[in-house]
Image: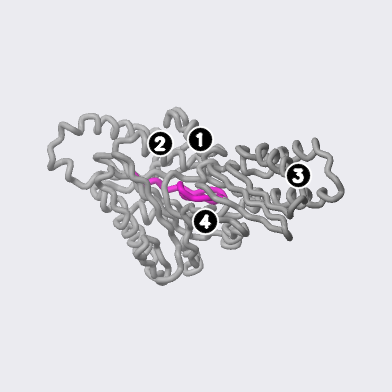
Amino acid sequence: MILYEAGCTMMKQVCSVLRFCAVSNTRNLHQQSKIPQGLVYVSTSNDVFANLAFEDWVHDNMCLTHTNVLFLWRNNPAVVIGRHQNPWSECNINKLILSNIQLARRRSGGGTVYHDLGNLNCTFFTDRSQYNRRHNLEMMVAALKGSWPNIHVSISNRDDILLENFYKISGTSAKLGQSVAYHHFTLMLSVKLARLKDALHVDMTGLDSKATESIRSTVRNLCDVDTSINHREVISALAKEYYSVHKPQEQSKLYYVDPTDEKSWPGIEDMKEKLKSWKWVFGKSPRFSVERCEGEVSVVIHTYQGRIERIDINTPPDAVDANDTEELVTILTGIRFWSSDILEALNSFLNTRTFTRENQETWKTIEHLIMSTAI
């Protein structure tokens, strides 16, 4: 049986945890070696940035020497890339914009994942010394097998959860801080697979990136195997399994938390705004380049941290004035690698020039190639 308690009760528990840690140095070694007690938090928000911010808040503010936390959350449609990834090479950014799908960059590593309300996200917070992601995955597998014995799930050597030893239903990543660590993973219950495919289909020809690339896998939903599997029942099954390890003497409790509540989590709004910023989502991208060619004209745009670092423009001899191309490169260097910014800079340059009939066509080609590289 799972009991549901309000956020105020949960906050008192958090304060108790913080006070307990303040005097933890006075505890003897035998007490410190015990398995930490556990708390299960369930987010009331479906905002990917709010939920990622809550992960940051717990990581940065809670002492978990004697208490572990399991945070369960799900989002409205979103694509979440790893800390060291390049969004231009990981997802179809134009498709995301047109479909109103959020793009977020998390603070952990790993690959790109698609989220919607058919996906459950699980974050296991522990003291760094207690970090054990294999153990966390085993708890999830045990929870699934205990409630739905007809499904066959297993853990791969890459710490993914597989369905029928083939279909990937869960990807995993982690962040290890100085004192607190967290391991989080997805679980595909009833994800809209057509939207997932469209969102993660990359059609960016001529792109050369050194960023961490996702490994593409064949995926499937758990509900395709057992239609009785749903979000609420999976949460209950996992909480029961989690408390059997971390708090077996008490009934299981789900503490519902609002990650947008600034009073309960001071500073979390600022954390959320930083996660939403262009500087974080796109500006943290590693170096990459995009090349476009048409006939004898080619353009290579080199970017770093989401801004144009250098442009190489190659044309037939005497097709354009070299001074003009140098000036255009100067104007574009340093601006965001974003179609609206590039178009504004291009128009500013082209509107101040009078081209001959001979080089006008070449400049139209240069403009087309530059604009085709960005979104």
Q: Is residue 273 above or below residue 41?
A: above
Mark 2–mark 3 Cα distance, whole angstroms, equals 55 Å
The percent coordinates of residue 93 (x first, y second) are 61, 51
Q: Which residue is mark 1?
A: 274
Report crowding for label 2: few under 14, some 14 to 19, many 20 or more residues within 10 A (C-alpha). Answer: some
Residue placed at 64% from the left, 43% from the top? 338
Residue placed at 39% from the left, 46% from the top? 71
- State whether residue 187 appears in this view: yes
Mark 3–mark 4 Cα distance, whole angstroms, equals 56 Å
Is there CB contact under 8 Å for labels 3 and 4?
no
Could you say whether the residue bearing mark 2 is in a helix, strand or loop? helix
Does residue 223 appear left or right of residue 149 in this picture?
right
Report crowding for label 3: few under 14, some 14 to 19, many 20 or more residues within 10 A (C-alpha). Answer: few
Type of amino acid at the residue the image marks with label 2: Trp
The percent coordinates of residue 356 (x first, y second) are 85, 45
Type of amino acid at the residue the image marks with label 1: Lys
Residue placed at 72% from the left, 44% from the top? 322
